[in-house]
Structure formats: structure tokens, C-alpha cells
Amino acid sequence: MAQYEDKVLHELDGIKEYDNPMPGWLMAIWWGSLIFSAGYLIFYALSFGEGTMDAEYRAETVQTVTAVQSHFDANPIVPPSPAELLGGAANDAVLAAGESRFTRTCAACHGDKAQGLIGPNLTDDRWIHGGSVEQVFQSIAKGWPAKGMPPWGRALRPDELAALVSYVRSLQGSTPPNPRAPEGDPFVAEAIPGR
């Protein structure tokens, strides 16, 4: 220990702190990381490289959006016929599926009984964007983003979308508690077969 006595920096309660150098391997890692970070900064942040990270990100985003749009163009949303949608409004299994989806997707804005909260009342005879089953299908599928209604056409399976439209049609004429004031133009709903 005598050979290290000249390297003692501090001594407290019999504990000595020596001035020992860091191991060579640790110093090599430290200097390597400094050199790498300087090279990385020069190559990417100062744009001396082929392409910047921002340009790479934008190119990949454009490529992804193009691929998604081409998929949507190749697989358009085809609405079921009005007869199928109205027939679903008389089918208990379809209505149960539509009610389940309505509770998870629509109740936050339209209320649990479709009485209207942020969104309009869906049980009265007034419709802002048309009340036929085809128009309701298009409103749900394409949404009305300017009015806060998101498009659900790509987020829901086709059978869920059709069941949701059938369920909404089955609610027309019901009398939920505390309905929102009527909005839109009057519409006489199509008759549901079997009801």
C-alpha cells in the first residue's frame, strides 16, 4: 500500500480514496462513443449524408400512404342493398351485433339509447344528412369529419357496419329518456319488413 500513498486524494474514517486511472477498455468505449456521436452529427444532423432522416421519414410516409390508398382503391366499401339493411333491422342476431358495436363505437357521442349527446338524436324523424338506410350507411362509413363524426368504414368489418346501420334504423321512432332536440330535415323512415 505504501506505493499508492502519494495517490491518496481523500481520507475519512479510515477510508482512503485513491487517484486511480479508469481501465483502458472503459476509456476506449468512452472515446469510441464520442467519435461515433461526432460522426453521426456530421453525417445526419448537418446533412452531409446522402439523405437526411427527415427526408427518409417523409419518403417512407408517402410510400405507406400510397400503398394504403391503392389497397382502398382496389377494395372499395360496397354498401349492402337497402333490402338487406332493412331485413337486418328485423333480425335479432343482427340487432344484437349492431347494439354491441353501437355501445362500443357510437354511444359516447350519440348516447347509450341514441338520444343524442354531442352527436344528434338518432331516434326522432329528423336527419341532418338524410335518414334512408343508404344515407345512414354512407354517414357512418364516410363520416362527417368537419362536424366531428369520424369515418368508420375502414375501421369496422363490413358485417359490423351493416349491423350498425340496421340497429340505428331499428331505433327510429323509439322514445329514450332526455332526448336531444330534433335537428335536420324530417324524413319518413322505410318500413322494416316483419315489424
Image (cartoon, rainbow, N blue to C red):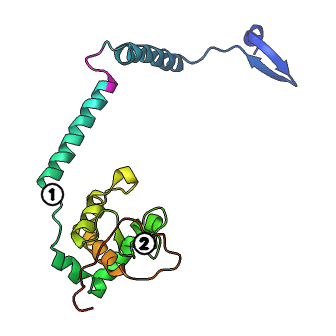
Q: Dot 2 surroundings within 10 Å: few (below 14), some, or many (20 or more)?
A: some
Residue 103: which disc? Answer: 2
Q: Quadrant of residue 51?
A: top left
Say if mark 2 contacts mark 1, CB within 8 Å: no
Residue 151: which disc? Answer: none
Residue 76: which disc? Answer: 1
Q: Which residues are magenta?
A: 49-54
Residue 110 or 31: which is nearer the viewer?
110
* Residue 107 image offset from top left, x and y in percent: 44, 69
Amino acid, disc 1:
Pro
Residue 72 or 26: which is nearer the viewer?
72
Amino acid, disc 2:
Thr
65 shown above or below 121 = above
* Residue 98 image offset from top left, x and y in percent: 33, 76
Instruction: Name the element at disc 2.
Output: helix
* Residue 180 image offset from top left, x and y in percent: 48, 70
Placement of the C terminus among the 4 image quadrants: bottom left
Instruction: Name the element at disc 1.
Output: loop
Residue in the image at 23% along x and 41% along y: 64
181 shown above or below 146 = below
Which residue is situated farthest in the right direction here? Answer: 13
Placement of the N terminus among the 4 image quadrants: top right
Q: Quadrant of residue 186?
A: bottom left
Residue in the image at 35% along x and 56% along y: 150
Q: Quadrant of residue 156?
A: bottom left
87 shown above or below 64 = below
Which residue is situated farthest in the front direction here? Answer: 186
Which residue is situated farthest in the left direction here? Answer: 74
Disc nearer the start of the sequence (2/1): 1
Residue 73 or 84: which is nearer the viewer?
84
Distance of mark 2 from mark 1, alpha carbons?
A: 26 Å
